[in-house]
Image (cartoon, rainbow, N blue to C red):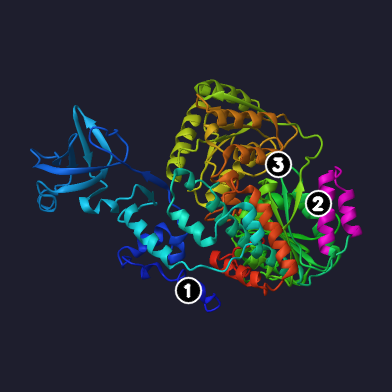
Amino acid sequence: MLNLMRPEILFPLFASSDTLKGVGPKLAPLVERVAGPLARDLVFLKPQGLIERRVTTVADAREGEPQIFGLRIDAHLPPHGAGRPYRIRAADETGFIFINWFKGYGAHLARQHPVGARRAVAGKPERFNVELSIAHPDYILPFERAAEIPTVETVYPATAGLPSRVLRKIVLDALARAPALPEWQDPAWIARMGWPSWREALERLHAPETAADLEPSAPHRRRLAYDELLAHQLAMKKRKQARAAEPAPVILKSELAGRVEAALPFALTGAQARTLAEIRADLASGERMSRLIQGDVGSGKTVVAMLAMADVAANGGQSALMAPTEILARQHFETLAQPLESQGIQIVLLTGRDKGAARAEKLAALVSGEAAVAVGTHALFQDDVAFRDLRLAIVDEQHRFGVAERRRLQEKGASVHLAALSATPIPRTLELTVFGDLDVSRLDEKPPGRKPVTTTAAPSGRLVQVVERLRGAIAGGAQAFWICPLVSESEVLDVTAAEDRAAFLRQALGPRVGLVHGKMAPAEKDAVMAAFADGTISVLVATTVVEVGVNVPSATIMVIEHAERFGLAQLHQLRGRVGRGAAQSACLLLYDPPLSQTATARLDILRQTEDGFVIAEQDLALRGGGDLMGLKQSGFPDYRFADPTTHADLIAAAADDARLVLSRDPGLTSPRGRALQVLEELFDWRADKAWNAAG
């Protein structure tokens, strides 16, 4: 497990967890499942909760609260009949209490706790009729060992075969191995924030004194969060610097792209013109571009990408646009083909469906350079695909591809420029955490003439009326998406809910109801989506785990069941599937009353605005922590300590600190620089790690 490049001071933390006390072959896989394979992972394991116990007497016992009693064993009461507990009656000077076990430990308990023995007992008392009892006490120790029962005890995530208390002992053993590391933070910053040292912060993490110490806002938690954010920002800044230092083909603005733009039936929005100028500056710089283009559905990302491709073609190079599904790749191809081919730029579509002579012909056009643009799926980076001179790679819905996949496409050329497209707006406060090693352009305007989607909310009790109105709309030629409720974290249950709803709607509306969900084979899913796109299907029932971003201008209705269960930005993304044509579109949010205050605010915001960036900021404010806006599906880092909302103020500070450090000490050779190298290794946010938002 030891990395020879890793500082020796970190070796104890990067030892395997099975070197810790009590972690044998049986427990090792359970420890790894809960925390990870290393001692460091246990040190970084945050407690889930806190048990605070008060020392009391039987007379002053409070039901349901953890307490500690000093008792004398009064009698053993074996069970009478199956399913009855083994009971010990115990007492102090104020009264009696019963200690119950339901697993038949009788003989053992009689030996361990004989009548007359004094015991310290910890647990939660409950009253049944007039009797006070504790079932399966947390601790029952000889009275002289009462001090071993913690009045404040941390609770760790348990799993079958590894209870919290056992895991706690293992964590504390790992913590004892954690060395005092050289301070990597600026002393003035530490003093200003009132933070402890790294070692002190870890100790407080695992020995909280009150519930407040468990909060992300606690000073020691903020210190650890900032350490992690700084390590991450350093790694991203280094990656960005390395790319900037890598020479890349110079691509200049062209008359050819100007002719493509002039032939468009619309003028570019201000945001499109600005973004195109930013891309052109990157392409002309002689340094490798790595730019993210963020924008709502319908904001014109593909058009901007097309004009950049035209510039590349005019400069003698090739471009590739990769989409996550075949149906989206075909959609892009249809958007790009006519404008580009009308100006003499040949374009090919390459998907897994291409076979034999047709595929060979497309591959020949790419290797010869005859085709200047390739649009496709994962098929683009297969081993037999070669380009004559690939200079620009464009990745649509970039979070849907793994790092290795994005890199394999870029490796089809030399120093290939990268533009990543995303329809999931990210709040500005979080851009640095997700895309800190990318330059970011925002398409925050929509083309003129688009009609806003009428958004309304209704209680689920009106389902029958909704279906009746839908029947009338379909009879008039309309098409509708019907998003099924998010039942639970179980995809199986979500699929069942979708299947049930599709069956209900077929019975109510007839056979032209389709169904797509994440358990279907890709080819089957694409066939249903294609049938919806060509109008064979009138209503498409779907779970949210599938890509329903196919462009169906005739789809003008979006129904979302149990809308209160979804995040605000997720609702916005779903709504964006309609409103793409000239006809007025509508989105209906069905909810189960009563709504919480947060759910009410969420639905109100959705009715008030269609601006994805505004919605993303509001979602951040409403949700607090958790899986914000589907960020985990958007490449959001898997932080251990940093919380995107509670620590939002630390994100920009860490980015500024990293930028300043690297400008003054690029090689990290100063005393603080060497300490920061230890920090990077500690958190594994190294510049050479595979995780990379840009691929």
Prevailing secondary structure class for the magenta stretch in the rendered image: helix
Residue assigned mark 3: 613
Question: Of 97 and 225, which appears nearest the observer?
Answer: 97
User: Which structural element holds mark 1?
Assistant: loop
Give the label on residue 11, or none. Answer: 1
Residue at x 27%, y 33% (from the top left corner):
60
Is 126 magenta? The answer is: no
Picture coordinates of residue 454 (x, y %)?
68, 28
- Residue 565 makes an appearance in the image: yes
- The residue carrying pointer 3 sits among few (fewer than 14), some (14 to 19) or many (20 or more) residues within 10 Å by Cα, namely many
Picture coordinates of residue 316 (x, y %)?
84, 68
Residue at x 47%, y 70% (from the top left corner):
14
In the image: residue 102, left or right of residue 325: left
Q: Is residue 341 above or below residue 20?
A: above
- Residue 695 makes an appearance in the image: no
Q: CA distance from mark 2 to mark 3?
A: 16 Å
Residue at x 63%, y 28% (from the top left corner):
604
**Bounds of the magenta segment:** 254-283
- The residue carrying pointer 1 sits among few (fewer than 14), some (14 to 19) or many (20 or more) residues within 10 Å by Cα, namely some
Query: Which amino acid type is shown beneath numbered disc 1?
Result: Phe
Query: Which amino acid type is shown beneath numbered disc 3?
Result: Phe
User: Which structural element holds mark 2?
Assistant: helix
Residue assigned mark 2: 275
